[in-house]
Image (spheres, helix red, strand yellow):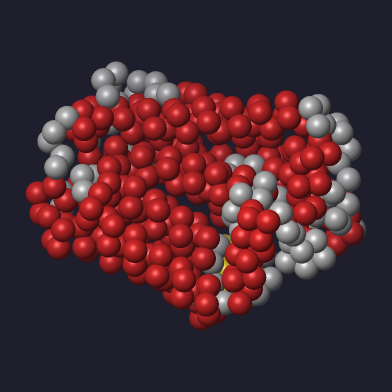
């Protein structure tokens, strides 16, 4: 087997290594206060990283044809898990998003978002939108995406459901869907978001806090805006070079979820502008290499799979960074490869392995770019 784009593996491992260091730095104090063990979060993350490296190795050598054939089965498994978590999931912080598996836990949303991209690539290869039109080509995958997003929203998890919808719309566009055909489902998605906000007061509170901050600079620092305020303090106090690795103050029970959702804020506080710029660069390079793989794939399944996985990782990164800097309402989305977490890390490393595997079979020409923009896709 010829060599693929090894930078995908290098960059994914680099981000994972940064995550290990920052999880320990951001979470050691909380681990000591909660478990009496400063190394608790680090040890858990190391175990997950080892498992993730195994998943990456398997995906980097997987038979793409067999993976393609397994897409419907994987989607069925994901739907079953998402349904199970709704009725028998573990609740934490007001949301039911986890399944207890003995000593470990699983977040089916991560399995669902991966399976959705895989299945959409499988479906769109066999039923080209350009040939079948709106009702036969576009409507069925739209209904599928909406159903999966509905199960995720039921947890409730509005942010992940929204990102799944955006990922799906992007894949449909890459597969040849006309922009005017996508306006209807976009409007429907906006209506669903409005209903979700109206029926979940805590979501509406977050949105109001965000809008108040953006439009008038008002921030409820003792209420709904407390977490964002502490995040901005951490980012602002980092300056150019930061306080030094391990020298951050906001992780000392000032900033909640410092080692998970707001790990970027600790990176900014401890490593400063120089550190976050380097982090941005590594993430951007990974996403660029992923899009490059998608552009060079000649087979519709592999091109859509690579594009969907890359777009999904990029959306999660943008959403996490936007929340930490006050550019989006507070959500519970992790920073890919870097934040503390098990299911997300495994899925992200699997995505990196698949992107590498697809790159192995690619040529040098940007085959998919010609297919999408060369006039063959209407």
Can the viewer see residue 333?
A: yes
Left or right, 68 with reference to 195: left
Pick the front one: 214 or 197: 214
Q: Specify the quadrant of the image occupied by residue 202.
A: bottom right
Residue at (88, 45) in percent of width and height: 249
Q: Is residue 67 above or below residue 181?
A: above
**Which residue reaches farthest left?**
131
Which of 298 and 140 lies nearest the eye of the viewer? Answer: 140
Which of the 4 quarters of the picture holds residue 113?
bottom left
The N terminus, quarter of image = top left
Judged left or right of residue 9, residue 3 is left
Residue 293 against residue 205 in the figure, above or below: above
Along the line of sight, which residue is nearer the eye, 12 or 228?
228
* Residue 4 % position (x, y): 39, 24
Is residue 104 visible in the rendered structure shown here?
A: no
Residue plotted at (50% across, 24% down): 7
- Identify the residue at horizontal 43%, vertical 40% (top origin): 310
Q: Which residue of the protein is positioned furthest toward the front in this rendering?
A: 216
Relative horizontal placement of residue 317, taking residue 142 as reference (left or right): right
Q: Position of residue 231 (x, y in %)?
A: 76, 50
Q: Nearer the viewer, residue 70 or 176?
A: 176
Seen at 68% across and 56% down, the residue is 216
């Amino acid at each position: 087997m010829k060599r693929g784009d090894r930078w995908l593996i290098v960059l994914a491992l680099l981000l994972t290594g940064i995550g290990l260091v920052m999880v320990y730095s951001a979470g050691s104090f909380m681990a000591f206060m909660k478990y009496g063990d400063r190394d608790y979060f680090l040890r858990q993350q190391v175990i997950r990283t080892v498992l993730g490296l195994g998943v990456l190795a398997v995906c980097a050598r997987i038979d793409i044809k067999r993976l393609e054939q397994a897409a419907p089965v994987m989607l069925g498994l994901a739907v079953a898990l998402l349904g199970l978590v709704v009725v028998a999931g573990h609740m934490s912080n007001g949301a039911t998003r986890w399944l207890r598996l003995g000593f470990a836990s699983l977040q089916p949303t991560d399995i669902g978002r991966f399976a959705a991209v895989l299945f959409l690539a499988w479906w769109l290869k066999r039923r080209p939108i350009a040939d079948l039109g709106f009702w036969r080509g576009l409507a069925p995958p739209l209904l599928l995406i909406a159903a999966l997003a509905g199960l995720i929203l039921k947890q409730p998890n509005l942010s992940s459901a929204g990102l799944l919808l955006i990922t799906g719309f992007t894949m449909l566009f890459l597969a040849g869907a006309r922009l005017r055909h996508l306006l209807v489902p976009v409007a429907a998605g906006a209506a669903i978001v409005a209903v979700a906000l109206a029926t979940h007061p805590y979501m509406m509170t977050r949105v109001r806090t965000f809008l108040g901050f953006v439009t008038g600079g008002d921030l409820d620092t003792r209420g709904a805006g407390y977490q964002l305020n502490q995040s901005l303090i951490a980012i602002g106090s980092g300056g150019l070079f930061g306080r030094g690795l391990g020298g951050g103050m906001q992780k000392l029970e000032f900033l909640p979820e410092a080692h998970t959702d707001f790990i970027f804020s600790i990176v900014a506080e401890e490593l400063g502008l120089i550190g976050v710029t380097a982090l941005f660069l590594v993430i951007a390079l990974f996403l660029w290499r992923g899009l490059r793989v998608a552009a060079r794939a000649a087979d519709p399944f592999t091109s859509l799979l690579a594009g969907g996985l890359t777009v999904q990782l990029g959306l999660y990164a943008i959403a996490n960074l936007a929340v930490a800097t006050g550019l989006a309402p507070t959500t519970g989305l992790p920073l890919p490869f870097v934040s503390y977490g098990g299911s997300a890390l495994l899925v992200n490393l699997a995505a990196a392995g698949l992107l590498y595997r697809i790159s192995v079979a690619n040529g040098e020409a940007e085959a998919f770019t010609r297919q999408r923009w060369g006039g063959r896709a209407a």
